[in-house]
Image (spheres, grey):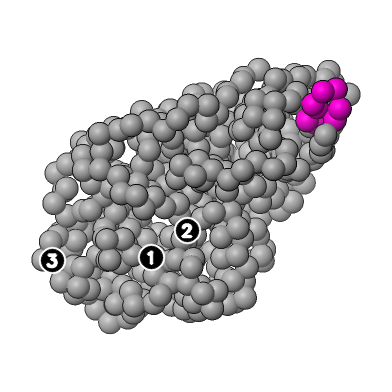
């Protein structure tokens, strides 16, 4: 049984330059939006705005024929919504069918052409009056981003905060003259450990006065076919822990990874069309909603920006796998990624068989959980955000979560049933999370 009390302390005071303009973004894989219309983009934008998110990071790969039309749809939707919600590009140097992005060239085949086409849109996110730009890797092209280099000169300037995580905090200092900040994509723990803020602080320290963009992700289970071995990292308490760590790290920007990467089980947005799920991942994603992970974002984001909204009602969110990690075949899935030099481990050596749940309380209360006919477990909740977990302990059935104040149940809800064995027809264990709330 694990108890974590969140956000009881004030913001840490750090010796780094932090502008008053703190922002929170959500990473959206444009390659997973082939069935989107302008209306669909509008729905996503409305949901993100309601959660307190400031902008979508449009991850785009070179040579994806879906990209130009869907980027146009996204900007049309954002402009139609009044451009209060923003968009900006993260050029994916590893994920596109045509490889790394050239600095210059005709649209849609270069960084400069994309930035120039959309930088004047009122919906394009700007920082220090410059179009904000990021990447997914691209360390072989660092010189394209040099001061006076082809991208900055070809666009009239950008505010550049790349994900060059493969360089590490030590390596980023060697290219600091080419960047305005950095985004660290290393947001999942290795092995049977929970995430700490140590790596974020190392990046922040290496950047000095430059902007740091911290990643926050709820889960990770890569399940697509055709991309090598599938793997997972421990999710469990990750969503709650990471938001607490944003207060400790106090970065300039936070990027939520992701809005719609179904194949890696990191999505917090809705699934609009099954055709947008990568091959091989459908059995793990269908009937496994993650929308409720957005429910507390207005409070998390407000707290990060030092302006949390008032808590006017009691709420809970909860997430868990629907069977023990040892139930069903691994179907080749390992914990950790050997391709990244990590030791491959059995999933059940890393994942905790338990339910993970948070309560946003307007006043102190008892919070209880009961899995099926198992024992009732009670926790002392404090006003504000609280987070706990409790193990399956062999119990099956639907967990029931309740908030009890002064002996009266003021709110309660039931989750999807936990089974003793995998419920996938293939016999494969499903390491994705089911997420609910009330």
Which numbered circle lies on residue 54? 2
- Is 390 situated left or right of 169 in this image? right
Residue 155 location, x and y as percent? 22, 73
249 and 58: which one is in front? 249
Q: Residue 394, can we see it?
A: no
**Of the residues under marks 3 and 2, which one precedes in the sequence?**
2
Q: Main secondary structure of the magenta part?
A: strand
**Of the residues under marks 2 and 1, which one precedes in the sequence?**
2
Which numbered circle lies on residue 125? 1
Q: Residue 88, can we see it?
A: yes
The residue at 66%/17% (across/down) is 1
The residue at 83%/18% (across/down) is 375
- Is 327 situated left or right of 28 in this image? right
Tag 3's secondary structure? loop
Q: Residues within 10 Å of mark 2 (few under 14, many from 20)?
A: many
Residue at which label 3 appears? 149
Is residue 308 one of those drawn in magenta? no
Magenta residues span 402-409
**Of the residues under marks 3 and 1, which one precedes in the sequence?**
1
The quadrant of the picture occupied by the C terminus is top right
Residue most toward the bottom?
A: 106
176 and 100: which one is in front? 176
- Compared to residue 156, the image places residue 390 above or below, namely above
């Amino acid at each position: 049984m694990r108890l974590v009390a969140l956000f009881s302390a004030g913001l840490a005071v750090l010796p780094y330059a932090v502008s008053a303009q703190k922002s929170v973004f959500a990473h959206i894989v444009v390659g997973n939006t082939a069935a989107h219309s302008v209306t669909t983009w509008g729905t996503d934008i409305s949901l993100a705005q309601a959660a307190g998110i400031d902008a979508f990071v449009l991850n785009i790969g070179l040579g994806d024929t879906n990209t130009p039309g869907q980027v146009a749809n996204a900007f049309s939707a954002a402009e139609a919504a009044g451009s209060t919600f923003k968009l900006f590009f993260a050029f994916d140097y590893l994920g596109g069918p045509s490889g790394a992005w050239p600095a210059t060239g005709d649209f849609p085949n270069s960084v400069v052409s994309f930035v120039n086409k959309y930088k004047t849109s009122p919906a394009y996110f700007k920082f220090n009056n410059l179009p904000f730009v990021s990447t997914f890797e691209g360390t072989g092209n660092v010189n394209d981003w040099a001061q006076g280099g082809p991208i900055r000169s070809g666009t009239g300037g950008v505010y550049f905060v790349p994900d060059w995580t493969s360089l590490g905090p030590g390596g980023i200092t060697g290219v600091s003259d080419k960047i305005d900040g950095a985004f660290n994509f290393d947001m999942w723990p290795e092995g049977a450990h929970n995430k700490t803020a140590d790596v974020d602080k190392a990046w922040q320290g290496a950047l000095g006065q430059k902007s740091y963009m911290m990643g926050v992700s709820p889960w990770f289970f890569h399940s697509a076919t055709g991309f090598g071995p599938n793997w997972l990292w421990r999710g469990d308490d990750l969503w709650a822990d990471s938001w607490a760590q944003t207060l400790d790290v106090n970065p300039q920007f936070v990027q939520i990874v992701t809005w719609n990467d179904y194949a890696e089980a990191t999505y917090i947005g809705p699934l609009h069309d099954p055709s947008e799920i990568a091959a091989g991942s459908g059995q793990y994603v269908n009937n496994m909603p993650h929308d409720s992970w957005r429910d507390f974002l207005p409070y998390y984001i407000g707290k990060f920006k030092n302006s949390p909204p008032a808590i006017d009602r009691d709420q809970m969110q909860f997430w868990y796998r629907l069977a023990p990690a040892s139930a069903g075949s691994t179907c080749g899935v390992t914990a950790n990624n050997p391709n990244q030099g990590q030791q491959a481990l059995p999933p059940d050596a890393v994942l905790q068989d338990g339910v993970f749940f948070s309560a946003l309380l307007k006043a102190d209360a008892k919070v209880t959980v009961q899995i099926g006919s198992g024992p009732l477990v009670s926790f002392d909740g404090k006003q504000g955000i609280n987070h706990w977990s409790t193990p399956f302990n062999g119990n099956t059935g639907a967990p029931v979560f309740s908030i009890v104040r002064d002996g009266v149940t003021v709110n309660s809800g039931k989750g999807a049933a936990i089974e003793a064995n995998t419920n996938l027809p293939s016999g494969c264990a499903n390491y994705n999370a089911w997420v609910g709330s009330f």
